[in-house]
Amino acid sequence: MARYTPTNTPIRNYAIAFFLSVFFLYADISSQTFAPLRGIINASSLYVQVISKSVVENISFTFSSLKQNKYLLQENKKLREQTLQIGLKDFIEKKDNEEKTQVIDFTDTLFSVFKSNGINVFKIASIDLKNYFCCSSHKIFLHNPNKIKIEKNFPVFAGNSFVGQTKKTYMNFIEVILLSDVEHVLPIKSDFFYCDAGGRGKPMLISCKLNDKDFKNQIGDIVMTSGLGGIFLKDIEIGFISEIFPITPDEIEVVITLKTNPLDENFYGIISRNNEI
């Protein structure tokens, strides 16, 4: 039960406590009775101080390390970004230099064939691969950023032979119909025949029908442009005879594999009428 009124402590209790304190103090002073205890207390105090200092230093070091690691991560990220930018710049410059080299080499080829510097060189924009591999329509599209005026039915040269002729231009592009398109006809010749070879609707293949009695060629023989029709320069190697099929007892179909694969080329030269003959 709680007390509701204060009680008085007898004076003898205070006297006893006083004499005990004096006794313990005298005993400690005269014989160092409590020295070990004081040593333990002092040592404990020192341990607490050392441990506290160590903990504080470790916490401080941890925060400092985290701050330094954050700084290093930021610097590492900046270095990675700079490295990527330098690598991308080098890649673009390398590609530009490669393209410049290709243009120079291709221009030299065009000059050696046509003896003219007035041929326009264009980079391929796209090719209709779906129709090219499965169907009869074979076309490519060339970049024309400077909107150079290109007329219809100009011959188109790539690699080291003709690949087609211009069909139309619109916006910044030039449409080219390839020799293998079923709508295209190319006048060709060999040592023993002339014919108008039509596209077969298959990649890199054209063909023409001939009288079997007059045919003396063999598979592997070279085929040239004849120059007839006024579009393609004559005596340019266009391909070789790859297959011969009988149609009737007197007629055969001669299949020619073209020399230049348009899928392997990046640049195309368009030759004007003045360079044809």
Image (cartoon, rainbow, N blue to C red):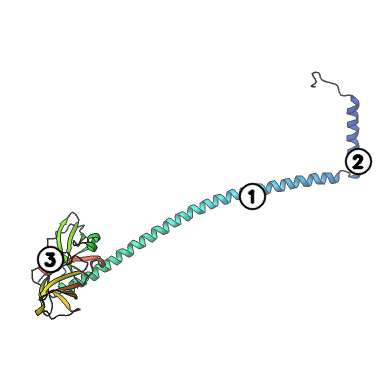
Q: Secondary structure at mark 1?
A: helix
Q: Is residue 21 above or below residue 153?
A: above
Q: CA distance from mark 1 to mark 3?
A: 82 Å
Residue 268: % across, % down: 21, 66
Camera-nearest label, 1 or 3: 3
Of the residues tagged 2 and 1, which is closer to the observer? 1
Q: Do the residues bearing badges 2 and 1 touch, measured as CB atoms within 8 Å? A: no
Secondary structure at badge 2 equals helix
Residue denoted by label 3:
272
Residue that label 1 marks: 58
Does any portion of residue 226 appear in the rendered image? no
* Percent coordinates x, y for residue 125 in the rendering: 24, 59
- For discs 2 and 3, the disc positioned in front in the rendered view: 3
Relative to residue 169, is residue 247 depicted above or below? below
Is the residue 68 above or below the residue 18 in the image?
below
**Residue assigned mark 2:** 27
The residue type indicated by label 2 comes to Ala
Q: Residue at x 22, y 60 (%)?
A: 131
Instruction: Decide which of tag 1 and tag 3 comes sooner along the chain.
Output: 1
Residue at coordinates 82% horizontally, 44% vertically from top-left?
A: 38
**In the displayed structure image, the side of residue 179 where residue 40 appears, left or right:** right
